Image: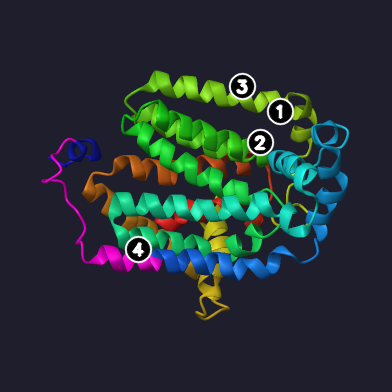
Amino acid sequence: MTETAADRMELPASAAPEPSRRWVPWMLAAGALVAIAAVWVRLPALGVSLWWDEAYSARQFIPYGPTKIIDPLYYLPNNHILFNLLAWATTAVVGTTEAILRFWSVVPALAAGGVIGWWGWRRHGPVAGVAAALIILSSPVHLGLSVQARGYGLGFLAAAVMLVGAIEMEEGGGWLAAGALAAGGLIGIWTLPQMAFVFAGHSLAVLIWGRKRWRTVITAGLVALGALVVYWILLPNLMGQVGRVGSRAADRLVPLGLVTAPSELLFGPTLSGWGLPIGWPPVVFSILLVGLSVLAYLRLRSLGERAEVHQLFVPWVVTAAALVILGSSVLDRYISYMVVPMALV
């Protein structure tokens, strides 16, 4: 019979499988090096002048606070509500500089790498944990977006927290796991509305395969209520602009985009950023992503980690399907949060 994650949790400490202790000091040093390097390479960008959407938000939304940030007369898709509210509160206290405006992007983005690094270490050992954190923090998409005064850093953190909370919930975790899923959901949705589909995917997987379905229903209901508190008066404006997202610079997402969008926009640039040959046909990246996903699926199934299988893949399928149905367009930043589960894959 296949051993499940829950079965392993019931083993005495002496019987539980542990990574070789000799790796731990080396991996701790490697993890510290990754963290220091991640901060170091981002520092020069924090003080440069704001540009494009950063400057627009800093001028049109952040100085005015909630009265303009949450106003249907001014709402646009690039108004990342939670980020702008946090930036408004912070600059009102400590003043306005480029670095301060970027604080609520770079810190959550780095924290996302820490969360997934810790999670990978806890579940699959130190090498997996450090590798996952490295893949996230060295991704060109993460590097570019984390230092912008926009909400994408909060999106990275929301994706990481939702993933961890959902896996714990599916495996029978208590209210702490539900709280993590809810917190990640609200952080994501209040910042990037399309992350409602990511939360829906996580919740759907827990509802189908989880042990405490009533807890999932309560959690989803609270998140839906929390989202409506912010978006209720913005819903007509928000729905009317669904098709505009990315329409100036990107193609409409099609069903095949379930594979090609993350592989070409997120996976391909990562390989190029690591100095591997560029100019490869896009299908190469799609094949690589499919191959890695199959290997990850087989590995997790052999370990009995079925909750991880569900929570890594179901939310992306739900999100991509929703974007296809809505006729939305896609750019790397609009699906940037996919870097988080892809790092674990």
Q: Which residues are magenta?
A: 10-30
Q: Amino acid at mark 3?
A: Leu
Q: Is residue 13 magenta?
A: yes
Contact check, label 3 and label 4, Cβ < 8 Å: no
Q: Amino acid at mark 1?
A: Val
CA gap between label 1 and label 4 equals 41 Å
Where residue 25 appears, as percent x and y from the top left, is 29, 65
Instruction: Please give the label number shown on residue 179.
Output: none
Q: Which mark is nearer the camera, 4 or 2?
A: 4
The residue located at (51%, 31%) in the rendering is 182
CA gap between label 4 and label 2 equals 34 Å
CA gap between label 1 and label 3 equals 9 Å
Q: Amino acid at mark 2?
A: Trp
Question: Which residue is tagged 1?
Answer: 230
Task: Name the N-terminal-most of marks 1 and 4.
Answer: 4
Q: Is residue 266 left or right of residue 341?
A: right
Question: Which residue is tagged 3?
Answer: 225
